[in-house]
Image (cartoon, helix red, strand yellow):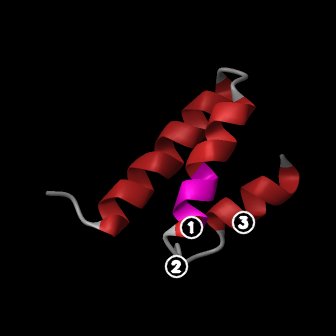
Amino acid sequence: MPNNFDSQGQRNRTGKRLEKDESALEAIVLYNANIYQNFEGSFPYQILEIL
């Protein structure tokens, strides 16, 4: 079973791919899920600020 870190990393990677595919709303959902799980780092916060 993957841990939170693995799941969060996967969501970040998927989010970046969705952004490139012009599916920003779907990416925002993933980044918010990471924030909800207390992501340790600034990546989702910075991306959401931009989006």
Look at mark 1 in the image and give the residue it sits on.
36
Instruction: Name the secondary structure under disc 2.
Output: loop
Q: Is residue 46 magenta?
A: no
Work out which residue is located at the far front of the displayed protein and give it. 36
Question: Identity of the amino acid at label 1?
Answer: Tyr
Question: Identity of the amino acid at label 3?
Answer: Tyr
Q: Which residue occupies 53% across, 61% down? A: 34
**Callout 3–callout 2 Cβ contact below 8 Å:** no
Instruction: Name the secondary structure under disc 3.
Output: helix
The image's mark for residue 45 is 3
Look at mark 2 in the image and give the residue it sits on.
40
Q: Is residue 38 above or below residue 8?
A: below
User: How far separated are the C-alphas under marks 1 and 3?
Assistant: 11 Å
Q: Residues within 10 Å of mark 1 (few under 14, many from 20)?
A: few
Please indicate whether residue 30 sits to the left or right of residue 1 in the image: right
Q: Tell me the chief SS of the magenta region.
A: helix
